[in-house]
Image (cartoon, grey):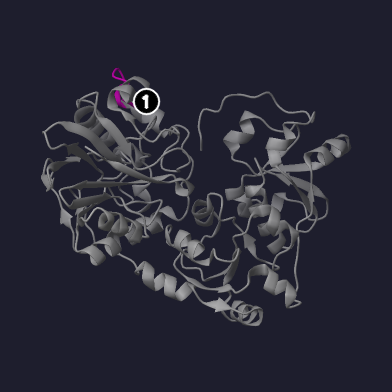
């Protein structure tokens, strides 16, 4: 049985493509669905089913567009209440796909409708399980997301459900089954996910902390909830979009692919109050940018940081990108529900500069430069996550995680010079652009961040292995 995993690293997401006898099933598709349709066409096959493991929080699924464009049925597990036409399956219900069978296993815990799909090949042999956010490689789904949509679903209640689902539904299955999860390392849907994106169930029973055979319910709940940080603010909004529906990506693209001259761009920004989002690489942005624009580089974890740093999912956005990257930026914004791109700067920042418009820049220094002035006791702000900071940091540095920076502006001096860094320069440039837009101009960014600082003899705390990846 061939199961094709389609992995998108920037949001640590895995969709799955299965074909048999000209019939295709897609599991947990991304917002842009044409690649799945093209893949089916290449196989001379038709998409029959779109299976959803649950109502996702970290991305907007492509189920509606895919069903509309192919005529496929959308399938959810028991208890799901979608606001559109879909099949809500029963526990143990079996769907046929060519010579294959797909069995529904209701596994509540991450959410109440969370469902695992058991894959059965043409010979009747159980091949693997598509687990969504119920079981990851090295971890299980966090149980604290649904309460942000339904208050009665406390994290303790859901954790208890997940304990039962794992013990009674997943762990009794054969050890040779392949586990196909919805996410890998880097996703905020868990805390200890492996970089590996598949494994055997037997190996997970041996190595996954949450599948220890001797674990009591109370121990499971305590370990699962320990170390969880607040989920990104856009998660509940994505859940509602996935439940209620959303605009077609085609409509979103038509609205966003609106090329604007520098004068028209400036006028529209002033008229609408749109956020100017610059998606160029941090090192390029630092050399020159439109004042008050926010930098979130397209080549990093773009969608996740957009969701972290732009509170209003309905915010109108004007884009500054490298030429030819405009559509990609619009699509990647739409993956997390930011559908209100209203135009982009034609010709990119170069055209803005050539038009004689006002520009700004971020002053930078090297790790060696900081090493030279370290004896003068400079103020150093480290914008990495607390777990990274706790693992190892420059002595006397202050930790203000990037995703909390707007809540801690009062702690950042406006009168004194300071230095800012992250792990490699991506996050600190996001922070720098935010501070610039708030009127801070009294700082420098460290090129290469902690990666380069580790190469100097600046005093650091002793490395301690982190207990959580969040």
Give the residue at x 14% y 42%: 100
**124 inside magenta stretch:** no
Which picture quadrant has residue 119? top left
Q: Position of residue 236 (x, y in %)?
A: 39, 55
Q: Position of residue 470 (x, y in %)?
A: 51, 38
Name the secondary structure under disc 1.
loop
Give the residue at x 78% y 55%: 414
Q: Position of residue 131 (x, y in %)?
A: 28, 39
329, above or below 418, in the image: below
Range of the magenta residues? 210-217
In this picture, residue 169 sits left or right of residue 348: left
- Give the main secondary structure, helix, strand or loop, of the magenta stretch: loop
Residue receiving disc 1: 208
Most foreground residue, 320 or 214: 320
**214 inside magenta stretch:** yes
In this picture, residue 8 sits left or right of residue 1: right
Q: Position of residue 10 (x, y in %)?
A: 48, 48
Residue 276 visible at all:
yes
Quadrant containing the N terminus is top left
Residue 312 visible at all:
no
Most foreground residue, 11 or 161: 11
In this picture, residue 99 sits left or right of residue 270: left
Most foreground residue, 138 or 124: 124
């Amino acid at each position: 049985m061939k199961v094709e995993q389609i992995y998108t690293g920037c949001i640590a997401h895995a969709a799955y493509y299965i074909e048999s006898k000209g019939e295709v099933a897609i599991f947990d598709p991304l917002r842009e669905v044409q690649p799945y349709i093209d893949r089916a066409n290449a196989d001379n096959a038709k998409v029959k089913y779109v299976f959803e493991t649950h109502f996702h929080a970290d991305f907007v699924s492509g189920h509606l567009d895919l069903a509309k464009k192919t005529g496929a049925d959308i399938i959810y597990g028991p208890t799901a209440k979608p606001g559109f036409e879909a099949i809500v399956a029963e526990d143990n219900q079996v769907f046929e796909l060519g010579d294959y069978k797909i069995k529904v296993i209701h596994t509540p815990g991450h959410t109440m409708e969370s469902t695992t799909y058991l894959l059965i090949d043409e010979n009747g042999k159980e091949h693997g399980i598509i687990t969504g956010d119920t079981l990851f490689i090295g971890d299980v789904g966090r149980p604290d997301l649904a309460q942000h949509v339904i208050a009665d679903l406390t994290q303790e209640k859901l954790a208890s459900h997940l304990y039962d689902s794992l013990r009674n539904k997943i762990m009794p299955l054969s050890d040779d089954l392949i586990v196909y999860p919805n996410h890998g390392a880097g996703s905020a849907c868990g805390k200890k996910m492996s970089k590996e994106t598949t494994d055997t169930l037997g190996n997970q029973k041996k190595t996954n902390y949450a599948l220890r055979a001797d674990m009591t319910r109370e121990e499971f709940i305590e370990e699962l909830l320990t170390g969880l940080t607040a989920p990104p603010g856009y998660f509940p909004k994505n859940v509602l979009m996935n439940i209620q529906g959303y605009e077609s990506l085609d409509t979103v693209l038509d609205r966003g692919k609106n090329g604007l001259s520098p004068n028209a761009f400036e006028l529209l920004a002033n008229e609408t109050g749109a956020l100017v989002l610059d998606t160029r690489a941090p090192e390029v942005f630092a050399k020159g940018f439109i004042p008050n624009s926010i930098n979130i580089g397209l080549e990093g974890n773009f969608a996740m940081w957009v969701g972290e740093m732009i509170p209003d999912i309905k915010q109108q956005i004007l884009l500054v990108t490298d030429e030819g990257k405009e559509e990609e930026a619009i699509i990647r914004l739409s993956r997390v529900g930011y559908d209100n791109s209203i135009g982009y700067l034609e010709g990119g920042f170069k055209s803005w500069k050539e038009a004689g418009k006002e520009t700004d820049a971020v002053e930078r220094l090297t790790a060696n430069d900081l090493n030279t002035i370290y004896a003068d006791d400079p103020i150093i702000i480290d914008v990495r996550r607390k777990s990274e900071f706790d693992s190892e940091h420059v002595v006397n540095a202050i930790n203000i995680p990037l995703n909390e920076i707007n809540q801690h502006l009062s702690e950042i001096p406006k009168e004194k010079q300071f230095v800012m860094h992250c792990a490699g320069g991506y996050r600190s440039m996001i922070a720098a652009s935010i501070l610039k837009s708030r009127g801070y101009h009294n700082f420098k960014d460290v090129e290469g961040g902690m990666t380069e600082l580790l190469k100097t003899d600046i005093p650091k705390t002793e490395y301690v292995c982190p207990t959580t990846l969040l």
